[in-house]
Image (cartoon, helix red, strand yellow):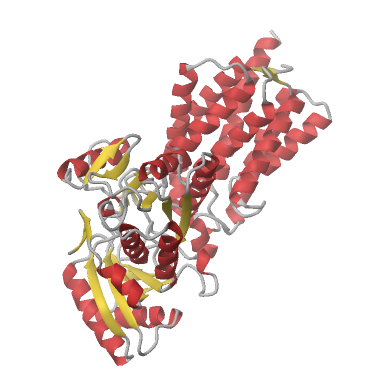
Amino acid sequence: MEKPIMKKMINHPKNLVREELEGYTAAYANWVRLVEPNMILRANPKSPGKVGIAMGNGPGHEPAMIGFVGEGILDVNVPGEIFTAPGAPRIVEGIKAADHGAGVLLYVANHAGDVLNAGMAIEMAHDMGLNVESVVLWDDIASAPPDQPEERRGIAGQMFPFKMAGSAAEEGLSLSEVKRIAEKARDNTRTLAVALTSCINPVTAELMFDLPVDEIEVGMGVHGEAGAGRRKLGTADEIMDIVAERVIRDRPYVAGEEVCVLINGMGSTTLMEMFILYRRLAAILSSKEITVYKARIGNFITTQEMAGFSLSLCAVDAELKHFWDAPADCPYFTVR
Amino acid sequence: MKAITIEQWKEVLMHIADTLAVHEAELNDLDSLIGDGDHGSSIHRGFEAVQVMINQRIFSSVGELFTQVGKVLLFDIGGAIGPLLGSFFTAAGKQAGEITETDLPTWAEMFTAGVTHVQSIGKAQLGDKTILDALLPASDTFQKASTMGKPMILAFQEAAASARQGADQTEGMVAKFGRAKFLGSRAIGHQDPGANSMALMLAAMFEAFRRYEDVDSE
């Protein structure tokens, strides 16, 4: 691959994470603060006696996950290096910081590094006598067949368990209940991503992968991992027809069901495009008598300046609807 | 060279760190073909932290040195390779215990303990296109050399060669773990970065010990 020219506004690549954490917590000081070793905590912690929620993951996907620290979602986020899960001892510090006396739920995105470090962190935490449970999150239908959900990557559909279990914790539910809600939201969610362009890793200044200018990758992972296949770019309607049909079929979502929808931008895709894509989705769901309860469109879990989007559906009942609608006040996710 | 002292191990670890710094870009390039391109930077970061740690304290045993190296690597590297490398050193350190120098049989046991722990954490087997494809052949080589009573320096030379060969063989493999597992057959033709960095580490160990051997025979 030809060496690309990285035109990003950074200082030294080795200081990326630290500098972004300092800038972010300075800008949003009413919501978040930076605590050593490099963790983001709520500036206004939740009340004692409520389950705490923590997550460690690789940054580079902003606003995820640092942008979701606040009421209704995360108490603590432990960033590692760019696209790299933090080391297990750092996650343990995050678990301790999230403990408000009623136990901690640790979210783990289903990627090799995240799972390995979180697994070790949970063991270390249990050895210290900490009350912590974990839930591994997956939603990407392109990574593995439906009968192997635990092989599927965690991508933008993680927003559903984040918010729903986060609000359950906010309302004072027990650790086992909060975990149950997270798993229920996860199991009701399916996602498929499409990439139009690659992106440049800001640490190495290299292109993450190669994609011919007239092609798209269906089933792209959030770090540029290959997906289910390449095809020529079509119209928005043609693309959404393919994506929606595969997501609906995977579970399947059926007539009479209600779903929440998340259309996630990968970083450089315009809202204009995502609104046009949603128009087609709305027509498809309507034709299948699947009702949209609520929809959110925007950049949630991005991959630098990659162009593309993912579609996530989450089947919702009264309980999940209640927690999706409950208040949240994070710098990059609000529900009033 | 009959046994490696704590001071010598410290120098070897420093040399490993310097070697990984030299090969950082090359390892990143390898990783960019089947991963996200930062393996070299990640390993270098971890061993830079090891260098700082080594300069800051005294070690009363080989076990203590290796355990502390493992802790630093686990804290600093992250990703998938951090827990694997960290666990290797921690388990080798636990096996070593209170001893202040390692002969070949002791080292072979330490290396095997490290590899066994990596396998239990990562769950990979030979042929899965991981660091184990370098670690397992090297471990076999150390054990055989120990059983046959070979000179230590020869054991390191042969283990470095086994690890190199193991890393080269990852080129033809499909990945069962990590990001590369989603590439399917697209991973074939590219070597595993973790196996390569381990091969480099063992080569660096041999290089460092060869200097002592030269000194010994003067």
In the image, A25 versus A130, the foreground residue is A130
In the image, A311 versus A49, the foreground residue is A49
Residue A168 appears at what percent x and percent y? 34, 62
Q: Is residue A11 above or below residue A255?
A: above
- Residue that appears at 58% across and 59% down: B174
The part of the image, by quadrant, that contains residue B85 is: top right
Q: Is residue B192 above or below residue A139?
A: above
Q: How many marks?
A: 0
Residue A279 appears at what percent x and percent y? 21, 81
Residue A214 visible in the picture = no
- From the viewer's perspective, is A58 left or right of B143? left
In the image, B31 versus A270, the foreground residue is A270
Q: Is residue A287 above or below residue A271?
A: below
Q: Residue furthest front?
A: A49
In the image, A329 versus B119, the foreground residue is A329
The part of the image, by quadrant, that contains residue A237 is: bottom left
Residue A331 visible in the picture = yes
Q: Is residue A40 above or below residue A166?
A: above
- Residue that appears at 28% across and 50% down: A46
Q: Residue furthest right?
A: B148
Q: Residue furthest top?
A: B218
The part of the image, by quadrant, that contains residue A301 is: bottom left
Residue A161 appears at what percent x and percent y? 37, 64
> In the rendered image, which quarter contains the C terminus of chain A?
bottom left
- Residue that appears at 40% across and 73% down: A190
- Residue that appears at 30% across and 46% down: A202
Residue A116 appears at what percent x and percent y? 52, 49
- From the viewer's perspective, is A95 left or right of A325? right
